[in-house]
Amino acid sequence: MIRQPIITVLGHVDHGKTSVLDYIRHTTLAQREAGQITQHIGATEVPLDTIKKICGPLLDKFKLKFTIPGLLFIDTPGHEAFTNLRKRGGSIADLAIVVIDIMQGIQPQTKEAIEILKTFKVPFIVAANKIDLIAGWRGVSTTFIQNFDKQLQMTKEQFERKFYELVGELSKLGFDSDYYFKVDDYTKRVSIVPISAKTGEGISELLALLTGLAQKFLEKNLEIDLTENAKGTILEIKEEKGLGVTADVIIYNGTLKVGDTLVVGGIAEPFETKIKGLLKPAPLSEVRDAKTRWQHVHEVIAATGVKVVANDIDKAVAGAPVRSAKSEDQIEQAKSDVSAEIESLAIETEQAGVILKTDTLGSLEAISHMLKKKNIPVQKATIGDIKRIDVMEAIATHKIDRLKSFVLGFNVKVDEDAAKLAKDEGVPILADKIIYHLIDTYEETYNKIKQEIENQNVQSLMWPCKLQFLKGYVFRASKPAIFGVEIIAGRLHTKASFLTKEGKEVGEVKGIQVEKENVDVLTVGKQGAISVDGVTIGRQINEGDILYAAMSENNFRKLKEHRELLNKNEIDALKEIAEIMRKNVKETWGL
């Protein structure tokens, strides 16, 4: 049997993901009795007969004999649903729609959605939404092609400017794209369908393209055996009034029945439970009535969405696989398969790196992949709330490398004890419900801490200093020599040695006084008296000499790396120090 393809809808906030599905549901549900539409929890089924009525002759262009029963749209917003839709080796989503506001173009969450699609190698179509907002746009038909020719020239030009800006943005992400009716190779180019979820314009073309592509390219992948045990994945674990904790599940193969043994992926390990009930929402006309919200069914067949009621289902993990079984041997095999699927998560860990906690298996895999692409090392990646043990592991890393001691949480809670410990130890806990916000916050915090560390390291370096030995201000010739100086560039610290013009390092500054007050540093333009051990005035140094603060070759190189922190006079002094050392000590000094 050929199952219906599973299609997920992704995109940036407010670009119209839900509106697209709302329009499709409204269009099909208006013909519910004739089309035998079923609305599922977390999914909307659109039968082929209804698609044919909506699309009309548009499907004829594919010249195909349609055998798919319809399309199954995943009705959970955002990337969270998609990252949950996984099976061994990838995602159970067969196709995706990326909804993009044509007026705003590709936004951060759009990029994130496309990255996830690339990760799971899921083909997608772009729905360029909100064409009705183009100035002067007139929607006289529900078909984009018919409408476009009837627009004023000014409106056409504005639309095409926005359209090709979108094509350019997709090109920067590595995708060749064009109008859906200009694409001749759907395996190499991304089709863009201009639509308006508000007026319905282009929706028929979007449905026709999805149906045609699914039939043409996916038919072999959609073959299933209804006599097999069910295979699926959990979208969400949640509590329903009167039902307790339930699991919203997408079944993508086989048949699932009440009374079946279900093997489910749990936080610790796979476990088995008995299905007490399978539920679907009542028809749309009755959904508003809380008393008749759910309809009990005895069985469901793939591909479909269903709410599962079972003992201990609260132990399950969103994104985890589920398998039904009928015998002890099948139960053991199902546990083995579920374990293997969970263990197949492509997450590479390192000895030192961030601690990652997420709410679902899919999110764990998707975020780990994104972190890897950004060269962010991951030490541990697990499901669940952030607890004290996670912070303790980050603290151990903190002692080795402060820049790797982060705890990242996606859509999870932070225990109070963990938060307090992290604050006391200076370990950042960053948690968010949007992936790109989480990664952006991490990068901002990382760069801030890195700058702090660099500033601390730079402050510990010997700073460039050029000074003049003031004539007439010799207070003692030696043991220690005490004399007056003026800082020409940079600053002079205690413990500094002097570099003579002959490249010799002499003495050590023991103290600095300004107007009889002891200070640790003397800055540019200031005069003061300094006491220096290890020199005798008249031998190593003389009145009127230009002196420099001596520094190591390594110190010099580090200052060069942070030359943005130096002013022009300090850079000039640094160059003069290098010239002296290369002339008198080593030609390659500091290079």
Image: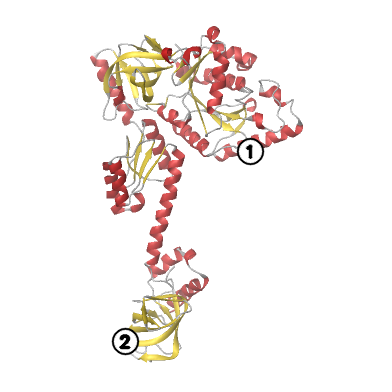
Q: How many labels does the image show?
A: 2
Query: Does 435 sit above or below residue 54?
Result: below
**Residue type pointed to by label 2:** Pro
Packing grade of label 2 (10 A; few <14, some 14-19, many >=20) is: many
**Residue type pointed to by label 1:** Glu
Quarter of the figure with the C terminus: bottom left
Q: In this view, does 105 lie to the left or right of 455?
A: right
Q: Which of 43 and 349 is in front in this view?
A: 43
- The image quadrant that residue 492 belongs to is bottom left
- In the image, residue 381 lies at what x, y percent? 33, 38
In the rendered structure, find residue 415 and report the number of the disc placed on it: none
Q: Mark 1 points at which residue?
A: 165
- In the image, residue 407 lies at what x, y percent? 34, 44
Q: In this view, does 166 lie to the left or right of 457?
A: right
Q: Which of 214 and 205 is in front in this view?
A: 205
Which mark lies nearer to you, 2 or 1?
A: 2
Q: In the rendered structure, which disc, 2 or 1, sits on the residue that comes first in sequence?
A: 1
Quarter of the figure with the N terminus: top left
Q: Nearer the viewer, residue 229 or 202?
A: 202
Distance of label 2 from label 1 (alpha carbons): 73 Å
Q: Which of 169 and 579 is in front in this view?
A: 169
Q: Residue furthest toward the right?
A: 153
Q: Mark 2 points at which residue?
A: 480
Q: Residue furthest toward the left?
A: 328
- In the image, residue 582 lies at what x, y percent? 44, 75
Residue drawn at (66%, 31%) of the image: 133
